């Protein structure tokens, strides 16, 4: 049996939605809570950044207490605001924590760094796997453009871990029927208000977001900008459409779709690369994908070498046949 901490873990969780329609726990937060549950024989606590967290979903993820900070009108999109809320939550809990975990996204990486400095501890970001050995937290991550897997130890203090969305191993968790809710006040540092959110506008997006999707269909230069079939495939699989850098450079898809070193990292259950060669600058962003399928006309392409399954040929022929096998609804 794998080693566990005997102290509670605090997880910063995100929701989508709004006050009117209600809030839904993100898939990345759900997965992170379940990963946290495998790491401790004690409790998992959640710090929710919305006043109306989805309590039943949090209970299903094994959360026993949900801490809800009063942000006094500040935006949880500002890293320093969230970091102050975590510091206050740790004080409110009043017991030593094993680790603080958050999702490694645009904000999570900054929050982890601020907290690492505050707690005079170590922070590991973009982590793909986490484990415990001889009481020490070990964080694995993929670095240098995907060419190296590295494992860091955070031997002392309060380790801070930002996990890539969807990454890590999770088991079945013991559900908590009615988690306790703890509202609390945060004393913000004066430096926190040095950054103020001016605007935040959700971009129109069909289907799930890249970070949340269980299936990602990524289009490469080999599609020559003919995206109808890859889009149809993504839609039938309820997946998100991703792109390589050259596809975005060509303007075939928006830059926000770019996966890789200078784009986003994804961790879907299934990644399908269509006309993608698999350059290391791209594949470093798909290291946490559970299954990789390559649809490409070059059997020597690096993506083929790292794939679980490859179909070699013209992508149009292959996708047409694949779509005939998939239900339309
Ligand atoms: C500093 C730096 C950062 C970078 N960051 C990123 C990044 O974040 N993300 C990223 O993606 N790239 C990034 N790049 C670029 C990266 O190195 C590659 O150039 C890029 O990923 C290649 O994209 P591609 O696979 O779409 O194109 P190609 O490498 O041109 O591959 C196209 C593939 O499609 C195949 N093909 C052609 N026609 C067909 C067909 N009809 N049917 C099936 N297959 C076909 C070809 O044989 C080929 O294998 C970066 C580069 C640098 C230097």
Image: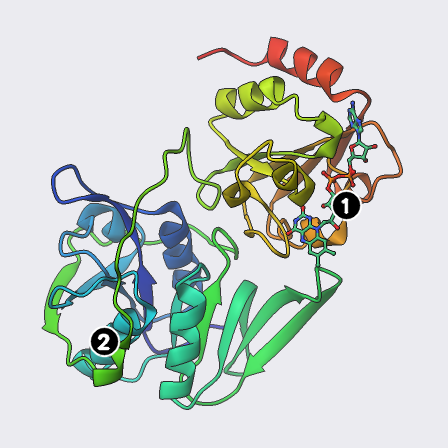
Up/down of 307 relative to 131, above or below: above
Q: Spatial distance from mark 2 to mark 1, Cα to Cα?
A: 46 Å
**26 relative position to 196: left or right:** right
Up/down of 132 relative to 244, above or below: below
Furthest-right residue in view? 300
- Mark 1 and mark 2 in contact (Cβ < 8 Å)? no
**255 relative position to 245: left or right:** left
Is the residue marked by circle 1 packed among few (<14), some (14-19), or many (20+) residues within 10 Å? some
Q: Which residue is mark 2?
A: 193
Q: Is residue 306 visible?
A: yes
Residue 229 rendering spot, x and y as whole percentages: 61, 18
**62 relative position to 138: left or right:** left
Task: Please report the residue visible at 56 percent of the width from the left and 71 percent of the height from the top.
Answer: 139
Instruction: Confirm if mark 2 falls within 8 A of ligand 1.
Output: no
**On residue 121, which mark appears?**
none
Task: Please report the residue visible at 23 percent of the width from the left and 54 percent of the height from the top.
Answer: 176
* Discs 2/1, front: 2
- Quadrant of picture, ligand 1: top right
User: If you read the primary sequence from the N terminus, does the residue marked by circle 2 or circle 1 appear first?
Assistant: 2
Is the residue marked by circle 2 packed among few (<14), some (14-19), or many (20+) residues within 10 Å? few
Is 326 in front, or is 317? 317
Label 2 residue SS: helix
Up/down of 28 relative to 228, above or below: below
Residue 303 rendering spot, x and y as whole percentages: 77, 42
Label 1 residue SS: helix
Res. 23 image quadrant:
top left
Q: Is residue 1 visible?
A: no
Q: Which residue is mark 1?
A: 306
Res. 299 image quadrant:
top right
């Amino acid at each position: 049996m794998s080693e566990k901490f005997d102290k509670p873990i605090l997880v910063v969780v995100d929701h989508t939605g709004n006050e009117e329609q209600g809030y839904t726990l993100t898939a990345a937060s759900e997965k992170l809570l379940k990963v946290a549950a495998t790491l401790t024989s004690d409790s998992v606590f959640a710090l929710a950044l919305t006043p109306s967290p989805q309590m039943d979903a949090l209970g299903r993820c094994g959360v026993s207490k949900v801490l809800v900070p009063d942000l006094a009108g500040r935006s949880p999109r500002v890293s320093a605001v969230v970091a102050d809320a975590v510091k206050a939550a740790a004080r409110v809990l009043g017991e030593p924590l094993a680790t603080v975990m958050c999702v490694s996204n645009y904000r999570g990486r900054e929050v982890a760094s601020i907290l690492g400095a505050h707690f005079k501890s170590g922070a590991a970001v973009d982590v793909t796997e986490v484990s415990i050995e001889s009481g020490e937290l070990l964080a694995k991550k993929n670095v240098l453009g995907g060419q190296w897997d590295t494992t860091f130890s955070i031997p002392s203090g309060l380790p801070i871990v930002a996990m890539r969305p969807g990454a890590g191993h999770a088991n079945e968790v013991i559900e908590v029927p009615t988690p306790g809710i703890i509202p609390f006040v945060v004393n913000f540092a004066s430096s926190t208000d040095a950054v103020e959110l001016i605007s935040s506008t959700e971009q129109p997006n069909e289907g799930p977001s890249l970070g949340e999707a269980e299936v990602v269909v990524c289009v490469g230069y080999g599609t020559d900008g003919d995206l109808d079939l890859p889009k149809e495939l993504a839609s039938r699989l309820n997946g998100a459409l991703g792109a390589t850098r050259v596809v975005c450079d060509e303007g075939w898809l928006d830059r926000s779709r770019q996966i890789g070193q200078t784009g986003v990292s994804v961790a879907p259950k299934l990644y399908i690369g269509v006309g993608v060669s698999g350059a290391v600058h791209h594949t470093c962003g798909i290291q946490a994908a559970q299954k990789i399928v390559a649809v490409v006309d070059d059997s020597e392409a690096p993506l083929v070498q790292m794939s679980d399954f490859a179909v070699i040929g013209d992508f149009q022929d292959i996708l047409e046949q694949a779509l005939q096998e998939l239900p339309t609804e």
